[in-house]
Image (tube, coloured by chain):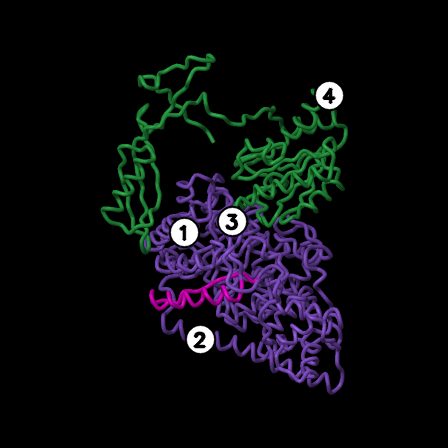
Amino acid sequence: MSERSERTGQHSSDALTPPSGGVSKQIVRPYGDTTGDGMVQVSFTLPVSHDKRAEGAAVQLANKMGIDPAMVVHAKPMGDGFTFFVVYGRVNHLVDLGAVQVVERDFALLSAKDVNTVIKQRLRRKLSVVGACIGTDAHTVGIDAILNVKGIAGEKGLEYYRELKVTNMGAQVSVPELVETARAERADAVLVSQVVTQRDAHLHNTREMSAAFREAMPAGRRPLLIVGGPRFDETMTDELGVDRIFGRGTTPGEVASYLVHALITQRKAMA
Amino acid sequence: MTGKLDLDPVLVARARELARRAGQPVVDLARSHTTVSVERAVLRLAGVTGADPDGIPWVNRLVDAVAADVGLGHGVAVPVFDALVREGSTDVTLLAQKAAAGSVRFTQPTGRAATAARSAARKAVGAGIRRIDRRRAERDRLIKRHGDPKQRPWIYLIVATGDIYEDIPQAQAAARAGADVIAVIRSTGQSLLDYVPEGATREGFAGTYATQENFRLMRAALDESSREVGRYVRLTNYASGLCMPEMAALAGLERLDMMLNDSMYGILFRDINPVRTFVDQRFSRQVHARAGIIINTGEDNYLTTADAVDEAHTVTVSQLLNEFFAHEAGLADWQLGLGHAFEINPEVPESFRLELAHALLARELFPDAPLKWMPPTKHMTGDVFRGNLLDGFFNLAGALTGQGILLVGMMTEAVVTPWLSDRDIALQNVRYVLGAAGGLHEDFVPAPGGFIRRRANQVLGEALDLLERIGEQTLLTAIAEGTFGIMKRPADRGKGLDGVAAHEADYCNPATDILEAVA
């Protein structure tokens, strides 16, 4: 996801520079068609029948969201007692780019060829990867995109890497089965995909999985634990007890590069 | 054949012959084996209902008890009704409860006792099948009274809240907004439960449990909606997974109208044992045939894991196999909702023309089947605006190629389970396209020698090549080697294998006997 940032220097309120730390504030606001106009578009449904009061309610909600003035450009009744709104308006919130916290990629992106070369020269054996969808999650689309030769977005999956030994356990794998397979395959890394997020199932399953590995294997012998899925917060690694979280749009190449970084390059550097 | 693609009738006949040749050994396998789920379905038809205090259905307890005493290979009907005759009772559910408590021993009777047991079993199962017949007649009456949808394709919409009492108002709202068919998506993971949950359910993961009571509640609600909107609103659920035969029986008993029922989906995507699947599938299709249920096959799924251009021919091959298995089980063409999907990467040049070629190929190959046209999922992203455009093209392809059932695509496919507004916007998209271009299939005849005709013939050719290869090695080997949707599924692996048994010489299944007598 790309963040479009527009400097909004001409607005006096935005031009404040911070007194401390020497890190300059970078204030941005949304861009409609003019720098600094702050224009956004939102849509939502209210559980009320469509009338003047419903439109007023939509404006009030938009105002409370910081959109002022708010224009209701579309209001459509849906079934009994629901109305869908599209609202355009100017948002009065500002964002300080200097205060935004994200997990930046802290490893080099390698080509498949380079990944193979590093593993071959420095690990001198195949790197073993075990992947699965755990819990009741039957959506293998994520794990398959990363593991299957077919891959995603034009990038081949991990099965394509000559120096990776991939075991794809598929869907609805139980945590004990996963631990057992990881042990049998002498997994260097375990990849778990979680798509279903109802009632935070992805978080519960991940915690259960990491706890099981902690219990089953001593710290030095544990495989690298990686989870991926569209709805994970990438900053939650400690909370979930895993080494890395990959979010929406992750490609096999990124995962392969991370494996090499975490299991070979970084480990050697620390040793 | 309507002849929009200039398909060679000799090649088409050859494709069907090869599908028959590939499928026949699997049918022979299905005819000589039974499964725990087939036997449980027989008991459901014989009138066993309810579950123990832990929620395990009495049919499961009874089949397990019989299997422990005499094995599964004779079929459970004769040992069960033999015990019932001996007890001097007619209440099979009560017998199941006693068996679960360990107070009944089962034997495989011979001679006069066997004849008496067979006759009692046939009577009880026959009553269940007559109930299915009455439900079918009731559907016919309601269709006559309320009418079918005015347009083709029928508009098929999904609800999936996890709570049947939330699903009902959503389904009724969808019917009011134009949906002709409502599908209640099952809870994630139900396909791997080896029992059917009981009662009305309010908790599920990304879907609502399929239970007999949930079927009944939703069908009753849609009967109300049918009266209100003046057309018969159909209800869909899933005869798939480990309980496929029981789902089919329950669907027949509760007058469901369509069931998802693919010949290979469970094998490929749920890692269910291939033999288990084929045995369960044949029985479930015989029930669907009798119940007047339209099956929906799952070819769309291949395209979500494999490339929709490179692997287009696997869809055709699977459709031909599904057609063969369906006909063999007694289903008529009007009951074959063969599936295919709009899953080509939109970045591929001429992707829309390729989609039209594939969709029209299915239309021409199966002119009398109500083809089920499935929306894009694989290339849907968080960009909901682009998603809505893609869904519009999907709808247009459906109109241009005369599809039978159109599953409404959601622009938020990759984002959330559909919101009320998502569904409304999606239906607006469908209504616009069908309103503006609903009859365009009349005018749409691809140019002779043009891109679309060439592509369709190419896919048919590739399908023939694949069928020839399958013919050389058998379908089970092809599945084991990953021919469909990349997954490799050997016949001696997968879930549910321990619930399969070969028929003994005296195997008796009164349901199959009755269903095959008319077929």
Q: What element carries label 2?
A: helix
First in sequence, mark 1 or 3: give its number.
Answer: 1
Q: Which residue is drawn at 70% across and 46% down?
A: A176
Q: Name the residue under label 4.
A: A271
Residue type at tag 3 = Arg
Q: Is mark 4 on a helix, strand or loop?
A: loop
Nearer mark to the viewer, of 2 and 4: 4
**In green, which chain?**
A
Chain ID of residue with mark 3 = B
Q: Do the residues labelled 1 and 2 touch (CB within 8 Å)?
A: no
A257 to A197, vertically: above or below: above
> Within the magenta stretch, is there residue B238?
yes
Chain ID of residue with mark 2 = B
**Do tags 3 and 4 sit on the same chain?**
no
Q: Residue at x 64, y 38 (%)?
A: A191
Nearer mark to the viewer, of 1 and 4: 4
**Do tags 1 and 2 sit on the same chain?**
yes
Q: Which residue is drawn at 71% across and 70% down?
A: B65
**In purple, which chain?**
B
Q: Is residue B449 visible?
A: no
Residue type at tag 2 = Glu
Q: What element carries label 3?
A: helix
Q: What element carries label 1?
A: helix
Cα separation between marks 1 and 4: 59 Å
Q: Name the residue under label 2.
A: B138
Q: Name the residue under label 3.
A: B455
User: What segment carries the magenta color?
Assistant: B211-239
